[in-house]
Amino acid sequence: TATTTLPPPLLLLLAMPSLLSPTGDDLKDWATDWSDEALKHCKQWIVLEQLVYVMPKPDPKQPPTVRLGVRGAGQIVNADGQYVDGWRWLRLSGKSTDPLQGGWILVDGKAVGMNRRFVEPVPG
C-alpha cells in the first residue's frame, strides 16, 4: 500500500486558502506555543483573528478609532517582531507603497483582556 505524507497543518493552510473560515475560527485551532526566538527571527506572520487592527504606535490603550487599517484571518503580513513596554508587537514592513507599512499589530491579546495571541509565525 502507498502512504501519503501530508504537509504540516500551516503549510496545508497556506497551500489551500479555501480551508479558511470567514470568521477565522479554524485558524485559532492552529495556534502553537512559539517562543521569543520566533518573534526575533520570523518575518512573515498569519493573522488568526477575524480582524486585527493596524495601529499608528505600539500602545494597547489606543482607541480603535485611530487605527490605520485592518488585516483579516488568514492574511500573511510581513513584519518584524519586538517587545514594547512588555507586550509583543509586530512592526509592518513591505513595499513603500503600502499605506500600512510602519504600522503596528498587537501580538499579545492579554494586553487588551483576551487570553490568546492574534498572529502566528509562518515557518520558513
Image (cartoon, helix red, strand yellow):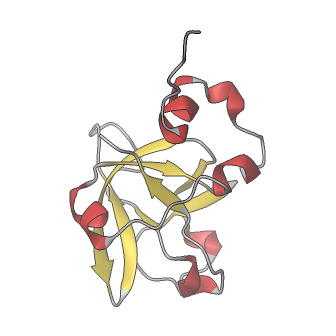
> Which residue is outermost to the left?
41
Q: The C terminus lies in which quarter of the figure?
A: top left
Would you say 118 lies left or right of 23 here?
A: left
Asked if residue 38 is positioned above or below residue 112 in the image, the reply reads: above
Q: Quadrant of residue 17?
A: top right
Does 15 appear above or below 88? above
Classify 56 as above or below 18. below
Give the residue drawn at x 57%, y 84%: 110
Residue closest to the eye, 74 or 19: 19
Residue 9 lies, in percent from the top left, at 55, 39
Q: Tell me residue 87's x, y (percent).
A: 40, 83
Which sits in the foreground, 69 or 71?
A: 71
- Image quarter where the N terminus lies is top right
Residue at x 47% of width, y 56% of height: 120
Q: Residue 78 location, x and y as percent?
A: 35, 46
Classify residue 76 as left or right of residue 21.
Answer: left
